[in-house]
Image: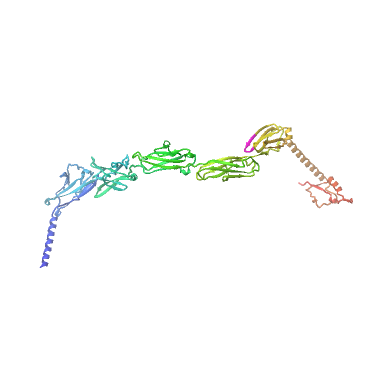
Amino acid sequence: MAGGRRAAGLALGWGCCVLLCCAAASKLEVSMPAVVEVESGGTARIECNFYIPGNGSYTYINWYYIDRNNQVRLCNITGSKIVEENTDYKGRLSVGEDKALSISRVTVQDARTFVCQVRAGSHGVGENRTELRVYKVPEAPEIVAYPGGVSVQSSDIPQIAQCVSRNSFPSPNITWHKNGEQLQPEEKMVKIPATLTRESSGLYTVSSTLFAHVTREDRNSLYHCTVHYWLQGQRRAVESRRVNVTVFYPAQHVKLQVMPSSALVKEGDDVKLVCEADGNPAPVFSFYKRDLDGSWQDLSALADTNSGVLNLHNVNKSSSGLYRCQTLDLDDMGQLEKDVELVVNYIEGVHVKMEPSSSLQEGDSVRLSCSAHSPVALDYQWRDEKGRKVTEGNQLFLSNLTFETSSNFSCKVIAPSVPGLEQSKQVAVAVQGKPRIVAISSPLYVRQDEVVNLTCKAIAFPRPSVHWNVNGTAHEYVENQHIASNLTVRVNHDLLRAGAMCRVSNALGVSEKHIQLLEQKTSESKGVIIVAIIVCILVVAVLGSVIYFLHKKGKIPCGRAGKQDITKPEARKDKIVVEVKSDKLSEEAGLLQGANGEKRPATDQSEKYIDLRN
C-alpha cells in the first residue's frame, strides 16, 4: 500500500516537471549580458540572443536606449532590412549577422542602458537590456610640494602638497602616502580635502590637497599620491612621483671645529673655525674669543655670519685661545653656543752655542749646541751651507779644523707631529790663520812680448790681500775662504829672467811663492832642427851607398886573413856587413895589460859590426 503511494507520487512529480519544461520551451526568450565595458574612443558590441519556440522566426527586432526613463529607438530590423533612426548615434551604429549592435567611437555620454526587443508573431514580444559602461583610464597624477616650506612650530595644520588627476571616467578617488604608508584624515593632525570637476568632454578631473603637521624627522620624508579607479570589475591604481617637502625646525645641537685640525695648526697658517647647527634654516652665527682677563672679544665682523665660518689668516702664537660660536634662531629666538680651543703650534728661541767661543785656529775642535722652545716635541738636524744633512741631534762636534772646513752651518729644528713646522738658525765656523797659497800658475811657458795671466790662489781668514812684485793689471775673486788673483802682464827679458812673486798676507801672517816663466821655442827654431835632422839622415844614406859601391869593386876587404869569429854570421851575397874598428878600443886594450906586461889575447879586443841589410 505504501509502495503504491510512493510510485504514484513519483509519477506525479515527473509529470509536473514535464509540464513546466514544455511551458518554458513554448515561450519567447531574449538573453543579453548584464554589463558591457568599453574604453572611451573604442567600439562597444552588445549581443542579443533569443529563442523562439518551434524554431520559429522573428518578425522584427528593435534596438532602444534608455534616456530619462524613456525608450528611444535606435534602429529597426525586419528580415534583412535595417532602418536606422535619426539619433545622436546615427552614423556610429552597425548590426551584425547575429543581430549584435556595435557602437563605434564610444564617448562617456554613451554610458547608458540599451534594450533589444524581439517580436515573433504569435509568440509575442520579448526583450532584455544591457548596461553599457564607458571608462577612461586617468592620467598619471601630478603632485606639487608646497614651495614655501613647512614649519614644525606652525599652529595651523600646514599644507604639504597638492595632487591632480585629469581625464578619467568614471570619477576616481585619491589617497595620500608618506614613506609608503597611507595617511588617513585625523582631527587636528591630517586633512585631505578633494574636489571633483566634470569637464565639457564628460571626463573627470579630481584634485586633492594634503594638510598635515610635521616633525624634524619629516625633513627626509617622501610623499606621494595614488589615483584609484575601477576597470572591468577590478580596482586599479596609478601612483605619482615622490616629493620631499622643506621642513623648518629650530636647532637643537651646535658643533664648532677647527679646520685643519687644531693639533696640526702652526704659525703662518690660515685657519677656519666652522660652526654648524642642525636647524633649518641655519641660524645666525656669532663668534667670540676669550681674552686673558676672561672677557669675550666679538669677532663676528671677521666671520660670515650666514655660513658660520670664521677665517683667521696668518695665525701666530697669540692666536691661541678659547673661541665660542653662538647661534640665534630668528623663529623662536632660541640661542645655542659651543666652545673650542685653538692651539697654534710654534718654534721660538732657536739658539746655537759654540764652544769654545773664542777664535779658532787650524787643528782646533769645536762643539755646536742647538736649543729651541715649542709646546710640542722637537727634532734637530745639522746641515752645511749647501743644504746637505751633516748629522742629527742637537749637537755637532767638529775636530781638526782647517780653512777648508770653515763654513756656515745651520741648525734645523723640526716638529715631527706638525707637518711643515720648522725653524733654522745659522752659525759661521771661521778658522783663522795666516794665508796658505794653494795654487799658482808655475812653471809658465811664455814668449817674448806675449800678454799672459799669472794666477795665485790662497786660503785664509781673516780675508787676506794679494800683492805682486811686478806691474800689471790684477783682478781678484773671493769664494768662501778662498781668494784668487789674476795678474795680466806683458812678457819681457827681465820677467823671463827673474819670474814673478805672489805675496799673500793678513793680520796673522804672510805667505809667498815664486812663479817661474820659461821661454817657449819659436816655430822657426823648430824648423831649423827638423832640417838638420833630415840632412844628417841624407848624409848617412850617401855614406852607406859609397861603402856598398867600394865593397862591390873589392876595394874594401871583409876581414882579416884567416880570422874566424863565431859571433859573426856567415856572409851572404845579399847582405853587407861593415866592420868598424875603434881607435879608442885599441887604447883601452893597451891599458888592460897585466902587471907583468903581458897583453890580453887579440880575441878580447872589442869589434863592432854595422849590419847594413835591408
**Residue 118 or residue 303, whichever sits in front:** 303
Coloured how?
rainbow
Q: Is residue 373 left or right of residue 44?
A: right
Q: Position of residue 140 (x, y in %)?
A: 29, 44
Residue 256 position by quadrant: top left
Q: Position of residue 535 (x, y in %)?
A: 77, 39
Q: Is residue 334 left or right of residue 36?
A: right
Can residue 465 be found in the magenta stretch? Answer: no
**Residue 597 or residue 604, whichever sits in front:** 597
View extreme (left): residue: 1
Q: Is residue 321 left or right of residue 603?
A: left
In the rendered image, the quadrant that contains the N terminus is: bottom left
The stretch of residues the image draws in magenta is 476-482
View extreme (front): residue: 293
Can residue 477 be found in the magenta stretch? Answer: yes
Residue 311 position by quadrant: top left
Q: Position of residue 102 (x, y in %)?
A: 21, 46
Q: Is residue 92 visible?
A: no
Number of marks in the rendered image: 0
Q: Residue at x 30, y 48 (%)?
A: 181
View extreme (right): residue: 596
**Residue 527 or residue 286, whichever sits in front:** 286
